Image (tube, rainbow, N blue to C red):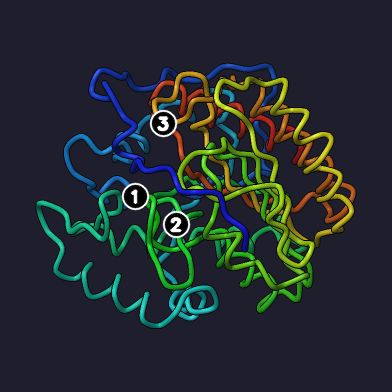
Amino acid sequence: MSRVPAIDLTRRALVAGLAGLTTAAPGRGAARAVGGTLLITHPAFARHETGAGHPERPARMRAVDEALAAPDFASLRREEAPLRGDVEEAILRAHSPAHLERVRTLGAVAADPPIHLDRDTVLSAGTWEAALRAVGAGLRAVDAVAEPGSGIRNAFCQVRPPGHHAGRERAMGFCLFNAAAIAALHARARHGMERVAVVDFDVHHGNGTQGLFWLDPDLFYGSSHRMPWFPGTGAASETGVGNVWNAPLEAGDDGGPFREAWSRRLLPALDAFRPDLILISAGFDAHAGDPLGGLRLREADFDGVTREIAAVAQRRCDGRIVSFLEGGYSLDALGRSAAAHLRALASAAS
C-alpha cells in the first residue's frame, strides 16, 4: 500500500480550547423525520471515560442527544444498542483474536485514570461495555434494514468509541473496534449481501477500514478527507484491488471541493460498484468549527452528501443505509451536523 509520511502530531495535540465549547442547541429543519429511520444509541456510550482534556469525550453523546430531542425527530424509531451473544464472533471477522483479547483484558482492569493504548486511545472502566454495544448497534442496524418486514430503510448508530482507524491488529486514533467494517462483514455472513460499501466523510482518513477491505473486490471503501493529515494515509493512488477510492482535500477546503470530490469521483465509483448495502462512517470533524479538522464544511454539506449517497442507495440497494458516528469534536457543530445528517436519512426513508 502506498503511503504519504504520517503527520508527526497526535490527534489530541491538535486540540486547543475545548473546555470552552458549548453543547448543541436542538436542531431545526423543514423535513420531518419519519418511522423508516432507526436511531440506535445507549447511555453506556457516555460511560466511556477518556480523561480530562480528551476531545473524544462523553459530552459528545449529550450534544447529539440534545440536538435529536428537537420536535422534528419525535417520530424517529429509537432503540438501545444491544449486548449481543454473537458480538465477539462478529468482531473476529475483522479483528485478530489477539486484538480482541487485549482490549478485553485491559478493559477488565481499567479504572481512573484510563489506561492508554497509545497517546490518543484509552480504556476506562466503562469502555468494554461501550465498545461491545457500539459493535452491537451496527449488527442490529444491519439486521433491521435487511429484514423485509421491518419497515426500516436506514439507520444511524450514535455510538462511541469511534471505529474507522481500528485495524485488524491495532487500536488507534480513539478507535478500538471497527464497527462499520464489522457490520459489512456481518451483512455478508448473516444476510447474504455479496457486495457491501463503506463511504466515509470524516476529516481523517479511515485507514483501518481501508486496510481491512484492501484485498477484497466485493468490499468498497470510498473516502474524502484532509491530506496530509492524521493518520498519513489516503492518497488517491491507494486503490486496493480497484475497490478503494480516496479523494484527498486540502487544508481550508470548503463545501465546493468537498462536493466536487463526491460528485465527480466517489459517488460514480460507488454507483458503479452496485452495492447491496451502503454503510457510512459519518464524521463531522470536517466542519468549519471543529478544532481537529482544518476544513470548512457546514451543515448543508453533510445534508447534501447524505442525500446523494441515499440516491445511490435507492437505485442500487432499495435504500439500505447504516450510518455510524465517527468524529466531531466541537459540541455545537457536532449536534447541528448530526441533526442535518439524520434529517437527510429520514427524508430518504419517507
Q: Residue 177 appears at what percent x and percent y?
A: 43, 63
Q: Which residue is mark 3?
A: 292
Give the quarter of the image for residue 11: top left
Q: What residue is rendered at 65% in x and 60% in y?
A: 144
Q: Residue 159 appears at what percent x and percent y?
A: 44, 49
Q: Which residue is mark 2?
A: 81
Which of the two marks, 1 or 3, is nearer to us in this view?
Answer: 3
Earlier sequence position, callout 2 versus callout 3 = 2
Per the rendering, the mark at residue 105 is none
Kindly check if marks 1 and 2 are in contact, taking CB atoms under 8 A apart as contact.
yes
Is residue 107 shown left or right of residue 338? left
The span from disc 2 to disc 3 (Cα, nearest Å) is 28 Å
Kindly check if marks 2 and 3 are in contact, taking CB atoms under 8 A apart as contact.
no
Amino acid type shown at disc 1: Phe
Amino acid type shown at disc 3: Leu
Which of the two marks, 2 or 3, is nearer to us in this view?
Answer: 3
Q: What residue is rendered at 63% in x and 62% in y?
A: 142
Q: Secondary structure at mark 1?
A: helix
Q: How many marks?
A: 3
Q: Residue 226 appears at what percent x and percent y?
A: 57, 35
With respect to residue 296, does 107 lie above or below? Answer: below
Judge the density around disc 1: few (<14), some (14-19), many (≥20) Cα neighbours within 10 Å: many
Q: Which residue is mark 1?
A: 45
Residue furthest toward the left? 112
Q: In which quadrant will I find the C terminus?
A: top right
Earlier sequence position, callout 1 versus callout 3 = 1
Q: Nearer the viewer, residue 342 or 283?
A: 283
